[in-house]
Amino acid sequence: MLHSILSSPPRRHLHPFSTAAAAAIAANSVPAAASLPSSSFTIQPPIHPWPRRLTPHNLASLISRQHDPNLSLQIFHHAHPSLSHALQPLHALFLKLSRARLFSHLESLLTRLPTPPPEPPLTTLIRAYGVAGKPLSALRLFLKFQPLGLSSLNALLNALVQNKRHRLAHSVFKSSTEKFGLVPNVVSCNILLKALCKRNEVDVAVRVLDEMSLMGLVPNVVSYTTVLGGFVLRGDMESAMRVFGEILDKGWMPDVTSYTVLVSGFCRLGKLVDAIRVMDLMEENGVQPNEVTYGVMIEAYCKGRKPGEAVNLLEDMVTKGFVPSSVLCCKVVDLLCEEGSVERACEVWRGQVRKGWRVGGAVVSTIKKKERALRFYPQRQLQPGVL
């Protein structure tokens, strides 16, 4: 049933996976991987003292501890292949080089390995390609080292969605069983739901959500929150609240993300009273707002020119142990100054400094400009736009 839904004609034509993937890769092809550094270190160990007794576990630890990823690579090559090509050291090296974005070294290494590496290092590299904005490199790697498992499929889907390749992610998902012999799980479906919602195909996402049970899958809070977020992006808060009600009807506890998405939706529409009601509801249900929730509400108050409410919520945020960003503090201070409450703005600023928090220069600059202007206004009240 799910595949029949996904195969129904969308508003924009989707090419078959093989054609779409081939076209995308061909249009974004990259030069061959660069050669690895010269291996002149094979006689002398790259670090001293070199461990007398080396196992895959402590070799992996040795690779991970190095600050210089090139030194990690030298250690890997110096060790005997029976050790270095084991899963633990290989995975440690892939993590180290991926985080340093030394993809040319990894690509060259893959051509030199006598056998294909196990799946975990490849999954790590697929994720790293996604973070680095290289979704087609992730796809190319996935196709080259077939067969791979669900963790690699989900990493690929996420890499494509991260980089807004939503149509390609949709195509990979639809082809996963036929082309790769992989049956999607809940994580796979959640990534697909995210792609559909980002493409504003929320109605299709709702149908996928309804049909997941026919695949033997149970949608979770993340599934429903993703669809809820799709309606929020449309500005359809009535449908968003309906999905939120379904979460409650199933006996699940919405998490802070679910509530924050709702708060954000109401704030975007300027419905601050409804947003506050959602915050009250989450606290009644034992879910505490996080720094994102507070930030969304405080920014909405600043946009609505409500300095008193913004300051009160900022103080509540601090009381709960969260550290507001300099950008957020600057918005509150700037609004106070524009409304003529320069002394109150100074109090907010000094309160941040007393707590040892670093306050951005923009905050200090705003206050100083307003204070200089106030020398010419003994009543200490400035109307917005005086400066």
Image: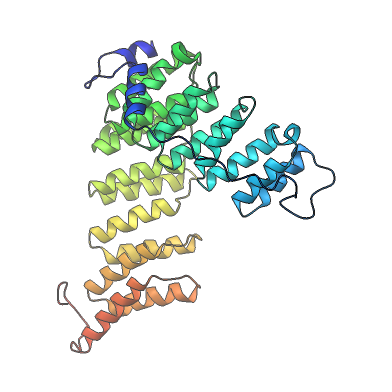
Q: Can residue 248 be seen at all in this image of the molecule?
A: no
Query: The N terminus appears in which quarter of the rendering?
Result: top left
> Which of these two is toward me, 75 or 321?
75
Q: Can residue 158 be seen at all in this image of the molecule?
A: yes
Q: x, y percentage for residue 90?
A: 65, 36
> Which residue is rendered at x = 45% and y = 34% of the image?
32
> Which residue is rendered at x = 54% and y = 42% of the image?
98
Q: How is the image coloured?
A: rainbow
Image quadrant assignment for residue 197: top left
Q: Is residue 161 above or below residue 301?
A: above
Image quadrant assignment for residue 189: top left
Q: x, y percentage for residue 207?
A: 33, 19
> Which of these two is toward me, 317 or 67?
67
In the figure, is residue 172 to the left or right of 202?
right
Query: The C terminus appears in which quarter of the rendering?
Result: bottom left
Q: x, y percentage for residue 53?
A: 84, 43
The residue most toward the right is 52
Q: Is residue 82 above or below residue 301?
A: above
Number of numbered callouts drawn: 0
Image quadrant assignment for residue 7: top left
In the figure, is residue 213 to the left or right of 171?
right
> Which of these two is toward me, 193 or 98?
98
Q: x, y percentage for residue 292?
A: 41, 51
Q: Is residue 118 above or below residue 101?
A: above
> Which residue is rendered at x = 56% and y = 44% of the image?
97
In the figure, is residue 5 to the left or right of 147?
left
